[in-house]
Amino acid sequence: MELREIERQINLIEDERELKTIQGFIKDRRTSLGNRLKYTLNVGERVAVNGSRGLEEGYVIKINRKRAIVNIDDMKWNVPFSMITKMGDSDE
């Protein structure tokens, strides 16, 4: 399904409970993807972090159970895996 079709379907929903249910599905999926990423990250790896300050580049200092410590501009940030994207040297 394309994003425009998903957006169209969401806009048809009139029940707040249904929207909250969908929001829960999205949250669970982001957590699942983040957990999967955790097992492929390595200390020293370049990553992009999508946070409140926009997309920023850094590198992984430490990998914890639920978050990674990422160095961005000489500052250490405790970042959930769901906000991290690997920056591979290939065409990822």
Image (cartoon, rainbow, N blue to C red):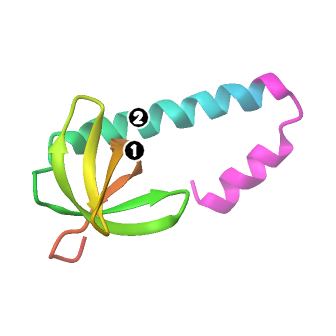
Label 2 environment density (alpha carbons within 10 Å; few <14, some 14–19, many ≥20)? some
Q: Which residue is mark 2?
A: 31
User: In the image, is 20 to the left or to the right of 43?
Assistant: right
Callout 2, which amino acid? Thr
Q: x, y (%) of residue 92?
A: 25, 70
**Outermost residue toward the top in this view:** 17
Q: Which residues are magenta?
A: 1-17
- Residue 79's place in the image compared with 26, above or below, is below
Q: Mark 2 and mark 1 in contact (Cβ < 8 Å)?
A: yes
Callout 1, which amino acid? Ser
- Residue 77 on the magenta segment: no
- Viewer-nearest residue: 75 or 79: 75
The residue drawn where x is 16% and y is 76% is 90
User: In the image, is 29 to the left or to the right of 69?
Assistant: right
Q: Quadrant of residue 17?
A: top right
Q: Which residue is mark 1?
A: 82
The residue drawn where x is 30% and y is 31% is 66
